[in-house]
Structure formats: C-alpha cells, structure tokens
Image (tube, rainbow, N blue to C red):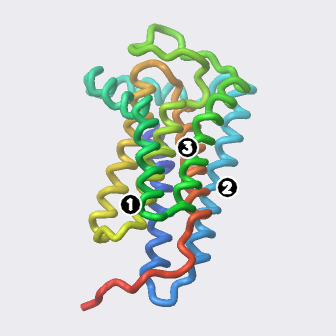
Amino acid sequence: RQRRHVGDAADVGQHVVEVADAEVGDAERPGGDPAAGVGVAAIVAVACAVAFLLLGAVVNGQGHTGLDAPASSFVSGLPVPTDAWTLLTAAGGLVLVPIGIVLVVGLLVVGQVRMAIVVAAALILAAVGTEIVKLVIARPRPPGEPLVSAPGYSFPSGHTLNSTVTYGLIALVAWRSPLPFPARRVVVAALVALIALIGLSRIALGVHYPSDVLAGWLAGTAIVAAAAALTRPAQAGPAPPTG
C-alpha cells in the first residue's frame, strides 16, 4: 500500500512530462497538428483541477483522507537526514520569488512577451490562490512538533504548489528551447524530481499532511498545463534530423 501511495504521487508529477512529450511529438513531426498539444495540455489542466477540487471537498468535509496516515508513516520512515529534507524544503520557499522574477525578465529579454505575461500570471495565481484556499478550507497543521516553522493553515501545501508551478514553468520553457532533445528530457526529469522531493519534505518535516502535498501537486500541474495550452507555438517546428 505504501508503495502505491508513492507511485500515485509520482504519477501526478509525470503529467508534466506527458504534456511535454505530447508537445514535442507535434513540434518535431513534419505537418504535425499544433492543436493536438493544446488539447493534451487542456485535458491535463482540467483533470488535475477537478481532482484538486474533489480532494478539497473531501478534506473540508471529513478533515482527513485515507491517504494521510499510511503515507505519512512511509515518508517519515525514509532514511533521509533531517538536514537534507530542510534543504529540499528551502528550495520551495522564498527562493521561488527571485527565481520567478528572473524567469519572467529572461523571457522578456528574448522577446517572448506572451510567454512572460502568462508565466507572471501563473506565478501570481499560484501564490494568491494558495492563500485563498488555505483560508477557505482552514485545515489545522498536523499535530505534534514540526521540525521547521510553518505558520498558517495546512491545505494545500504552499511550498508544493508554488514549486510545482515555478519549476514546472521552467521545465516548459526548457522543453521548448533549442537544447538537444536528450538535454531537454534530463532537465524536465530533474525538475519533476525536485518538485516531488520538495513535496515529500513537507510531509517528512511534519508540517503537512500527504493530502496537502497531493493537492499542491494537482493544482500546480493544472496551472502549468494551462500555461502550456495558452502559449502553444502556432506553427510546428522543423523535423529532427534522420539517418
């Protein structure tokens, strides 16, 4: 059961890669239909948003889910030093603000104005939306002594949601860059792994329930997928070399 819970979390993060795979299939295939990538991204966005709303309704109505106790026990039992979890959780904290600013400014510098506007809107939506949902659900933090300070309500995990959006958007930009295909896959995979580890760190440090983290992954993936759909290149790119 514990392995299944971790697998479910990995599946959420894998949606980012699935969107990217759909995009590269269209962008690098001669005569490919750009609308197909938009459709996949839109479907992922809607599916994750609906799942997030349903999870929020369950938490709001019951106060807990069947995922929380076994997944918390599993993550807490992982042989990872507390310092490592603390370092990972810091990657989803205030450092996201300068990272997001650099990303938006960088897009403006290279002339990707539309992408910069959508990215800025997505980052603001993630930050503001997290706080609004926290106030609406008003879920207390897990009982016990947390290993790091975490004021405010618990659902959803702000570190998880905002890191999913920030690093997910970086992955999207990297995927559409001129980097070689293998390099793009490595960058996307590394960022998805970082997103997953940041979420797990919030559980291990005792500041969030697993369902808080799952909600952050779902909402964050929905926002990234929506951004991908809104900024899909209008024309297919050149075919990859053959032979």
Q: Is residue 179 left or right of residue 144?
A: left
Q: Viewer-proximal residue, 182 or 52?
A: 182
Q: Residue at x 44, y 81 (%)?
A: 237
Mark 1 or mark 2, whichever is nearer to me: 1
Which of marks 3 and 2 precedes in the sequence?
2
Ranked by sequence position, the earlier of labels 1 and 3 is 3
In the visual, does 89 lie left or right of 45? left
Residue pictured at 61% horizontal, 57% vertical = 226
| 141 and 152: which is toward the camera | 152
Query: Dividing the image into 4 quarters, which one contains the C terminus?
Result: bottom left
Between the residue at mark 1 and the residue at mark 2, the CA separation in whole angstroms equals: 23 Å
Residue type at mark 3: give it.
Leu
How packed is label 3: few (under 14 Cα within 10 Å), some, or many (20 or more)? many
Residue under label 3, please give it.
Answer: 123
Say which element carries label 2.
helix
Residue 174's disc number: 1
Image coordinates for residue 221, horizontal then vertical, percent: 55, 49
> Can you say whether 29 is above or below 231 in the image?
below
The image position of residue 168, as x and y in percent, is 46, 50
Q: Nearer the viewer, residue 235 or 188?
A: 235
Vertical placement of 54 versus 155: above or below?
A: below
Which residue matches tag 2? Answer: 46
